[in-house]
Image: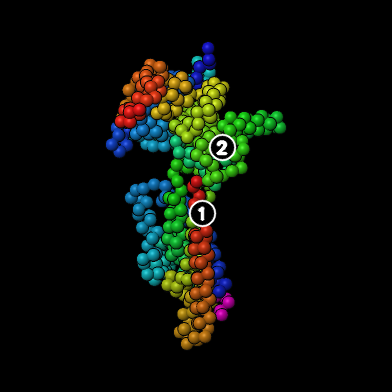
Amino acid sequence: MLPPLRTELAVRLRHRVGALDIDVDFKLRERWTVLFGPSGSGKTTILKAIAGLLRPDEAHIACTVLTGSDLERTLVFVDTETGCFLPAHKRVVRLAPQQAALFPHFSVLENVMYGFQEMVRDEQEEKARDNKIEKLLSDFQITHLVDKYPAALSGGEGQRVNLARAVAATGCRLLMLDEPFSGLDVKLRDELIMNLRERQERRRMPVLSVTHDVAEAFQLGAEVIKIAEGKVVEQGPVEVVLAEERMLLLQQLGNPTSQIRDMGHPI
Amino acid sequence: MDTQALWLTLRLALSTTALLLVIALPMAWWIASGTGAARVLIQAIVALPLVLPPTVLGFYLLVALGPLTAPGRMIIRLLGHPLAFSFSGLVLGSVLYSLPFAVQPLVAGFRAVDTALLEVAATLGAWPLRTFRTITLPLAKPSLVTAAVLTFTHTVGEFGVVLMLGGNIPGATRTLSIALYDQVQDFNYAAANRTAGALLGFSLVTLMVVYWRGAERRPLVG
């Protein structure tokens, strides 16, 4: 049995962006939860509301931190009824945005270290810290890039630095990844998922990621919250929630000519 | 060339630039960091010296700092002399007069910084002041230089406020532009020519430096 999570998050959110009405109510119950839905269904807005990057029309978002066996502390991120709004920098929620948004005037190493703050008192601790940083850089396969500047990186490299930067930040309660593996090839994606999993087990923090890729959701074996047009359609294990999408995908894979025939090019 | 006036002008421009950057930085940051009626009002007030005749500003300052108003009387009691017709008074007038030349480039520079970067910094736990110091300010550095150079140049070239507020006291309030005015009044066209030429050359060279930097600037976001 794995040790329980350190953090639980409860989200109740109503917010209007453009023509989209977001109205969701969910709890993070598992270690890895995936927000699944088509583009424009409000996934990124939900992440932003949790991170504190927007002021929602109506919301109650609270995070319960389990500090000991029966000790717990609830931290209200936002409650529009009482007018409570905790600014983003105090929430200790890490968000790797979809667009890498690397600091252009910092090197890759400086970018990754931006949120990393660890005091060292002696040589031994300094060595432990250096090892930690080295492990992080090699996990995300960016060790060879540390001295480069963002302008010199490819899209995939930038995305890895973006993820490493969010993961490296000290004192994370909840890690949120917005389409984290877009632009990365499958092999790299597999390795990154493995590394992220391992870290997560060690730090016992929940991860909330966004995707519209069925294969990725299955690979993560995560709890899935299916979103459509700003509403939660279903929440549950991936095999249940995405069964239909899986069938569709398998059909397409199992019958490679079907698509071509559909397009009106008979072979 | 009136070297006393030259040194006074440079001293005035330097003091004004230093003081104005200290005032303009937080002001521009505040204006750039949101919207609303309060910000619009402050921006309009900051821009006033661009459209008002300098003599209007000079007149109000002259009255406000003199014995006719309560703050003016207080200053006189504190300093032992009125601020008007002194170097410090001149600095105050120049700061107000050059305010838009410092604030406006800074506001534009701060607004041009990608908000996604500021958001990322916040989600990484950086307090607003750290975000400003490590992200906003370095990325807006070119506009900081522009603001400093424009303030300096504008102060060197100011005339109306100085004349109204400072009078024409050699060594205290007689700047190059006032000296030039005097030389013309005295029909000393040879001296006036030298003074005017120096001011023209200086302004042209500084503006060339500003545009040179602008042309060299590479896009930062990759």
- Residue A221 in the magenta stretch? The answer is no
Residue A22 spot, x, y in % from top left: 32, 31
Disc 1, SS: loop
Q: Classify mark 1: residues with Cα within 10 Å, few (<14), some (14-19) or many (20+).
A: few
Nearer to me, A265 or B123: A265
Disc 2, SS: helix
- Does B60 sit above or below residue A82? below
Nearer to me, B199 or B11: B199
Q: Residue furthest right?
A: A123
- Does A210 sit above or below residue A222? below
Separation of disc 2 and disc 1 at Cα? 24 Å
Image side of residue A175 versus residue A84, left or right: right
Image side of residue A243 versus residue B123, left or right: left
Q: Which residue has dot 1 on it?
A: B218
Q: Residue at x 40, y 23 (%)?
A: A253
The image quadrant where one finds the N terminus of chain B is bottom right
Q: Mark 2 touching mark 1, by CB under 8 A?
A: no
Residues drawn in magenta: B1-5
Q: Residue at x 55, y 71 (%)?
A: B8
- Residue B2 in the magenta stretch? The answer is yes
User: To which quarter of the image does residue A55 belong?
Assistant: top left
What is the chain identity of the residue bearing mark 1? B
Q: Residue at x 57, y 40 (%)?
A: A108
Q: Which residue has dot 2 on it?
A: A112
Residue A163 spot, x, y in % from top left: 52, 33
Residue A175 spot, x, y in % from top left: 48, 28
Q: Of the residues shown, which amino acid type is indicated by label 1?
A: Arg
Can see residue B157?
yes
